[in-house]
Amino acid sequence: MKLKAEVLSPVGNTEMLVAAVRSGADAVYLGAEHFNARRNAENFGDAELKTAIEYCHIRGVKVYLTLNIVISDKEMPRAIDTARTAYRYGIDGIICADLGLISLLNQKFPDLPLHASTQLTTLSPAALPVLKKLGICRVVLPREMTAEQIKEFCAAAKKENIETEVFVHGALCMSVSGQCLLSAMLGGRSGNRGLCAGPCRLPFSSNGNPDRYDLSLKDLSLLRHIRELAEYGVSSFKIEGRMKRPEYVAAATAAVRQAVDNGYTDEKLLETLKNVFSRSGFTDGYFTDRKGADMFGTRTIEEIEASKEVFSSIHELYRNERQSIPLDIRLLVKANKNIELYLSDGKNTAVSFAPPPEKAINRAVTKEMLGANLHKFGGTPYYTATTEIDLDDGLSVSAKVINNLRRECVEKLNAMRTNTAEIRELDVLLDSATTKLKKNQKLFARFDSADQIPDDISGLDYISLPLESDISDLCVPDNIIKVVDIPRTFGNTLLKPKLEEFKRRGFTHALCGTLADMETALCLGFKIIGGMGLNVFNDFSAKWLFENGAEMVILSPEMPLRNAVKVGHNTGIAAYGNIPLMLTSNCPIKNTKSCAECGKNCSLTDRKDVTFPVKCRMGMSEILNSRPIWLADRKDELDFDFLMLYFSRETKSEAAKIISAYKSGCTSAPNTEYTRGLYYRKVE
């Protein structure tokens, strides 16, 4: 039985577009020249985008545009223009990751379908009411979800009338939902800005072995679970791969198409797909909740050679036009009247006329003869569903007349299928209109445990502790605001009861890294501090958060300082600490050590012998930067309402010295290794 779900294919250039459509895609997603998470792909200029949309719509295929990176304030008008252009051309939806951009598009183009990118990190159904309010009609789920989590999410999304989109094949980012600072921190190329350099594919070791790749995951494949996903209510089956070859897109699309149509993919096609691209095979470890070393793999020389051998055979998958649009045909051939041809796709009806037929001299034309020429739709996406021919006796009509009539009618139908509705655009001021307030700068210290808190914390205005920490013996002066740091996790059932416990112990604020955490904390009466995980990269995102429950917002660590200081009031930055570069659902340390051996005090070492601490948080792992950010000697340049100090492994005495340096300022950098983060660097 054919399943009711969309096959969604990646497109990085025109050849990939043709390969996807001819191999069975119901929809494709692609990027314009700017503002997409695969900026190194060939992508599509304005004219190419228009042609691509027309090509797809003629063939009944939807097109989604990716505007799925964080956007700076300076770039926002241009990003809006890109969306407007795509909307005018008839785009079927726009995939977004930036809260500010989503908010503006929802206000400005209320009829434009908006999809929440996986980079928005929608880890639990708690985020759905917020996304609904933002105008989101579809959510791209994180690749790290288990079957049970997907099932639960789909059920909740259905109640909100929001569609779900799930990756079923392609590369896996080590960092949850692709939110990663590692590439930017190591090489100045930001994954959140669409230029990830793929550092997780380089050697990283959890036991000192330089030949290990403990951050490189195998590619995902859920082809054997397609029917199960369809039963959950998944709306769209998505394939990753805008940076790969057309042959890969063709093979992956054909495999998913076959699974959707038949409920399974045959072994021969699965083997072809494995040969065209894999990393030591495929994995379904997240979906089946069987995480561990078996999920990790690299691209081998043998796999590269195998892919070369199958490329030519894959071309057959998309050599010819895929005839997928059924037509109802009606032809009228009546004496002394113009010949009339009607072609209908069920929605549009094209009609063409030819001069009246002549009387037959020798042999009269038959319905069979007319039908033989009417049904010649080769080289088009159409095929005959039904045919009705009304023919008077004794008439003559040449094959040339019918062929010309058919071609003309097909061209008219093509034009009708590419027509777009008039866009509705509202006047929205592209000015966030927030004002930076000048007041005493506050210090916000985030500790990993209560044991790190110095005896004298009079220099602090806020202290924060993780939700998973022990607060039974905590004693903090009443004038210091207590903040609970909610871990980014997949709807953990322990979140709510633990938050209620923190609230009883006098914690009034919650540090939230996802929209789901914000919604949960707000419902429990907490005041909200937007965390780094929200990727606030512009004033529009900050403004939206303030309007929707946030009291303070920590800006993205990727924002240049010159831009960050311009963002509106009640904003701050991570001014100290080994900040998290990755959030992982599959602990890389477990590749070589058990949890008992780790003792929550392990690290990864890269090929340059640089060490990155790894810490556990309620079933997730955070990979921290190798060196702490230090800005105490640049305090005069930090024109923010508050500074966050991120303490991870510091002792009480070390934390006390650091707090003192940031409270009173200092004139020199520490005599230990440190970094200025990305605040003074050019990040692409």
Image (cartoon, helix red, strand yellow):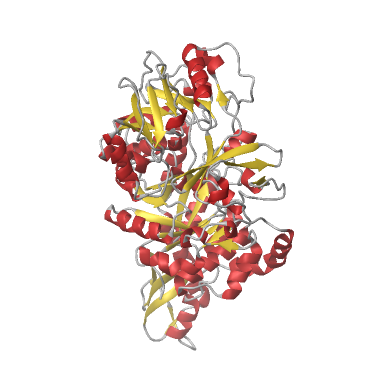
Question: Residue 173: horizontal and vertical position, in percent?
Answer: 55, 49
| Quadrant of the image containing the C terminus | top right
| Quadrant of the image containing the N terminus | bottom left
Question: Residue 510: horizontal and vertical position, in percent?
Answer: 35, 34
* Residue at 41% from the left image edge and 86% from the top image edge: 394
Seen in the picture, residue 384 relative to 256 is either above or below; the reply is below
Seen in the picture, residue 249 relative to 74 is either above or below; the reply is below
Choose top left, top right, bottom left or bottom right for residue 668. Answer: top right
In-front residue for pair 345/410: 345
Is residue 506 left or right of 272 when viewed as pictured?
A: left
Question: Residue 313: horizontal and vertical position, in percent?
Answer: 67, 69
Is residue 593 left or right of 479 when viewed as pictured?
A: right
In-front residue for pair 478/417: 478
* Residue at 70% from the left image edge and 38% from the top image edge: 609
In-front residue for pair 364/307: 307
Seen in the picture, residue 485 relative to 359 is either above or below; the reply is above
In-front residue for pair 385/629: 629
Residue 324 in sight from this viewpoint: no
* Residue at 59% from the left image edge and 35% from the top image edge: 184
Choose top left, top right, bottom left or bottom right for residue 348. Answer: bottom left
Residue 97 in sight from this viewpoint: yes
Question: Residue 478: horizontal and vertical position, in percent?
Answer: 30, 22
Label tally: 0
What residue occupies the far front of the structure in this picture?
473
* Residue at 34% from the left image edge and 38% from the top image edge: 518
Is residue 426 left or right of 274 when viewed as pictured?
A: left
